[in-house]
Amino acid sequence: MVFWRLTTVIVLVETFSSDDGSEYHHVLKGCKRRKSHIRSWRTATSPLKFSIRQLVKLQSHSWRQSGSIMLWRYVENRRNFPGWNFTANVEGCASLIALLDAFTKDDIPVSRTLTITAPTPAALANVNNRSAASVAPVKLRMSFSAVLSKWAFSESIDPAEFSIGAEWLPLFRQAIADIHAGKDDYSIGPSGSSMLWVWRQPAA
């Protein structure tokens, strides 16, 4: 798979940047002979990776949101559920998983803005945080970070911002699948204000 990706890049270089395409083709041949060269090749050509971005349509740019996605945090009694709370219906779960898969395929920093649905009384009752007041953003700007270990929510909610790195994508993807399967009442992410509590979607 690695060499397939490298070969694809070379085709793009020769097609869109023929002035130096032969130079990168020569480096690629060296990579095929010695796998240890692959890391240095990727580092040396990282600017090229981003220049191609404008020429190739990103998977995440073709993504369209569907379904209902709820995100909120408590402003009272936060000790029980610090951070954020999250649930989605079946269509929302499928839509989010498709976005995470698109981030993985794009493999470069990119972001999309999601429309957030305010938590319903049934969703709040499922968490059962007494009568604690909560706030919910209208929009969430979700970014795929170049920092592999990145997981961070902003304090603001206008809009809310969430940045995630590649190391967290499988865990977040599984959490979304758990919602669809009815598994909930656990959190992912670092402790504190960026924790994300996962809740099943209550019946309408």
Image (tube, rainbow, N blue to C red):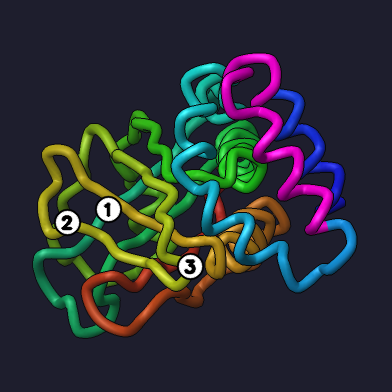
CB of mark 2 within 8 Å of CB of mark 1?
Answer: yes
Magenta span dominant secondary structure: helix
Q: Earlier in the sequence, mark 2 or mark 1?
A: 1
Q: Is residue 50 above or below residue 127?
A: above
Q: In this view, does 32 lie to the left or right of 70?
A: right
Magenta stretch, residue numbers = 13-31
Mark 1 residue type = Trp
Which quadrant of the structure image shows residue 190? bottom left
Viewer-closest of 64 and 14: 14
Camera-near label (2 vs 1) is 1
Q: Name the residue under label 1.
A: 72
Q: Name the residue under label 2.
A: 134
Q: In this view, does 22 lie to the left or right of 192?
A: right
Which quadrant of the structure image shows residue 85? bottom left
Residue 114 position, x and y percent, is 37, 32
- Please report the residue visible at 45 percent of the width from the left and 75 percent of the height from the top: 187
